Image: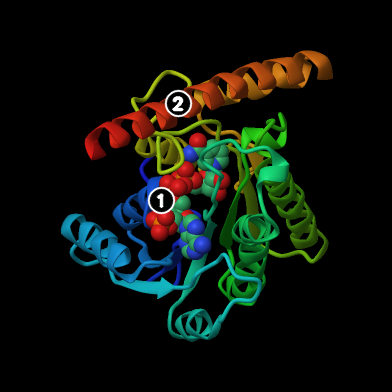
Amino acid sequence: MPSNPLRRYQHGGDCWALVTGATNGMGEEYALQLAQLGFNLIIHGRNASKLDSVAARIKAKNPIADVRSLVIDASTSTHDLSELKKLLAEVRLTVLINNIGVVTQDYPLLEEQNAALIASQLSVNTLFPTVVAATALPVLKRNEPSLMINMSSLGAFAPAPYLAPYSGAKAYMLGFSRALYNEMHCENRNVDVVCMVPGQVVSGMNEGPPTTMMPMAEAWVKAALASLAPGFFSKRPAPVIVPHGVHSWAARAMSIMTRGMNDSATCSVTVKLRNKKLDSTASKTVDSSNDEA
Ligand SMILES: NC(=O)c1ccc[n+]([C@@H]2O[C@H](COP(=O)([O-])OP(=O)(O)OC[C@H]3O[C@@H](n4cnc5c(N)ncnc54)[C@H](OP(=O)(O)O)[C@@H]3O)[C@@H](O)[C@H]2O)c1
């Protein structure tokens, strides 16, 4: 990584970053690595004690970092934003990482998901990031040059069976982020809006071990932050970035495949993952019924 790829967003004194979904996976890594680059942090999650543990890990590595916690359950249809607004009034935010996301772990058919489960997934994956972006944007405009990262997925380019609400939500994040990028352009603003596109990464969503196609969250976030460094032709990052090497090759391959080839590859990969998950759930059920006997 160059010395500090986010220097563009560090100006005028202490600078703060807000990371949503910071209690696991890539969100926790974003928070740790941003603290190492000199940012103070607002870390968001739904569980106060998990946030305390993440704050302690950040402080252990970066004793001078100031870390504040923000507890909001993102799965509801409306969100109490009063604490977020209060924090934004107290600190100088220059970076928002709209990282939060949730997926159904057991690859259910759509009709197996009730309305409440569908609504909560859509709220976590689309409504909450949109509302957080709208709340933080006036502050990012005041403190420009500033940065907003929105997290999509390769699933937005290759919509996966058994993950229809999730794949649809990630396509929303891609469209939302690109639209906001264009809005900043039309308004002559220096708020850099970037849609980051991960493939599979080891995290709360995917158990390890890591493989060539599935890096650890630490390596993925390192690549994501490095991809924001000013380029030869522009100081501003691209609107859509697939930062990790193998994922970026996969995205390029997808872009030249026919739709049929793309769909068939996506179905084959997802069906394998689903079968693996179903096998592991079945063997856990057998183990627990043997324990009870
Ligand atoms: N991992 C992948 O393979 C992959 C691939 C493509 C895209 N992505 C995207 O990358 C982003 C990060 O994914 P990840 O794999 O790092 O996720 P993760 O490890 O599962 O962590 C998700 C974070 O979101 C929080 N969260 C979930 N539901 C919440 C709710 N209702 N209210 C508040 N917080 C909530 C979690 O809190 P708890 O700790 O309390 O659960 C956790 O902090 C997501 O947007 C995801 O869609 C991931």
Binning the other alpha carbons within 10 Å of mark 1 as few (below 14), some (14 to 19) or many (20 upward) gives many
Label 1 secondary element: helix
Q: Is mark 1 within 8 Å of ligand 1?
A: no
Instruction: Work out whether residue 167 or residue 197 is closer to the camera in this orientation and state it.
Output: 167
Nearer mark to the viewer, of 1 and 2: 2
The correct choice, above or below, for 210 with respect to 20 in the image is above
Q: Is mark 2 within 8 Å of ligand 1?
A: yes
With 129 as the anchor, is 206 left or right in this view? Answer: left
Binning the other alpha carbons within 10 Å of mark 2 as few (below 14), some (14 to 19) or many (20 upward) gives many
The correct choice, above or below, for 27 with respect to 10 in the image is above
Q: Amino acid at mark 2?
A: Met
Measure how far apart labels 1 and 2 are at the Cα level: 17 Å
Res. 250 in view: yes
Res. 20 in view: no
- Residue 216: x and y in percent read 37, 33
According to the image, what is the colour scheme of the structure? rainbow
Q: Residue at x 51, y 66 (%)?
A: 94
- Residue 49: x and y in percent read 28, 68
Q: Residue at x 27, y 64 (%)?
A: 55
Instruction: Work out whether residue 64 or residue 213 is closer to the camera in this orientation and state it.
Output: 213
With 137 as the anchor, is 219 left or right in this view? Answer: left
Residue of label 1: 30
Q: Quadrant of residue 157?
A: top right
The correct choice, above or below, for 213 with respect to 81 in the image is above
Label 2 secondary element: loop
| Badge number at residue 214 | 2
